[in-house]
Amino acid sequence: MKKLFLVCILTTSSLFAQGQTPKQSNLESITLAGGCYWCVEAVYENLIGVQSVISGYAGGKNTNPTYEDVSTGRSGYAEVVKITYDKNVTNLDEIFKVFFTVHDPTTLNRQGADVGTQYRSAIFYKNEAQKKSAQTIINAMKKAKIYDSPVVTTLEPLTKFYKAEDYHQNYYANNKNQPYCQMVIQPKMEKFEKLFKNRLKKQK
């Protein structure tokens, strides 16, 4: 399986300390867009080392965008999640491995039936180190020919993150019986849980 091979492309750069209370200096954040933020949020909320996942918007120019604005596909904003994680428990390599496993980075401005620039695949970096790390894994995937089609994930500087409306937060956890959650999010969760079973907050 090509995506299983993806998980093994990069080796973990450090040994993770389990069970420690994170210090503020150990916390880092990265902002990712991989289609509907409900899907991406649900996955990362279950990864060991992740302290918080906030659904929101990034990449546009107008201030204080709303879900209605972003849903037009004309705002420039993408649906994103801001992931804050403890560097002693996980790292950026693992964050990116999960990202490229649970969404399709080869479909331009869409994930499945969700279509529009707001659903683009993008990594919003806040410094050159994050940009370099993202470019490294993308180059590795291209070299290994993980996908049959070109990777279209964009690397965009994070200029501003806006938190989405409250009802979008923890959407999957609060709405598991909704058809979208069962048909779209649940399969992504199952794939994540299978490939990263040793990295789940709640061991299956």
Image: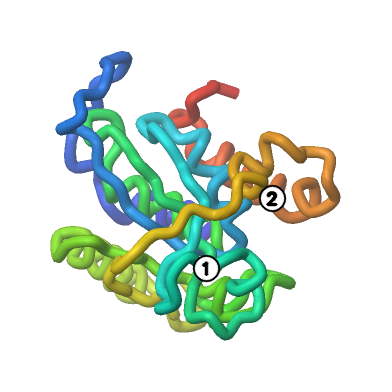
Residue position for label 1: 65
| Numbered circle sitting on residue 101 | none
User: Nearest the camera: 15 or 156?
Assistant: 156
Which quadrant does the C terminus fall into? top right
- Report the residue at 49% width, 42% height from top: 44
The answer to which of marks 1 and 2 sits earlier in the sequence is: 1
Instruction: Point out residue 196 in the picture as x, y percentages from the top left corner.
Output: 48, 38
Instruction: Point out residue 38 in the picture as x, y percentages from the top left corner.
Output: 62, 52
Q: Is residue 45 above or below residue 180?
A: above
Under mark 2, the amino acid is Ile
Looking at the rendered structure, the secondary structure element under dot 2 is helix
- Report the residue at 52% width, 34% height from top: 46
Task: Say few, some or many: other residues with alpha carbon within 10 Å of mark 2 (under 14 / 14 to 19 / 20 or more).
Answer: many
Under mark 1, the amino acid is Pro
User: Nearest the camera: 88 or 204?
Assistant: 88
Instruction: Using the numbered discs, state the Cα–Cα distance from disc 1 to disc 2 in whole angstroms.
Output: 25 Å
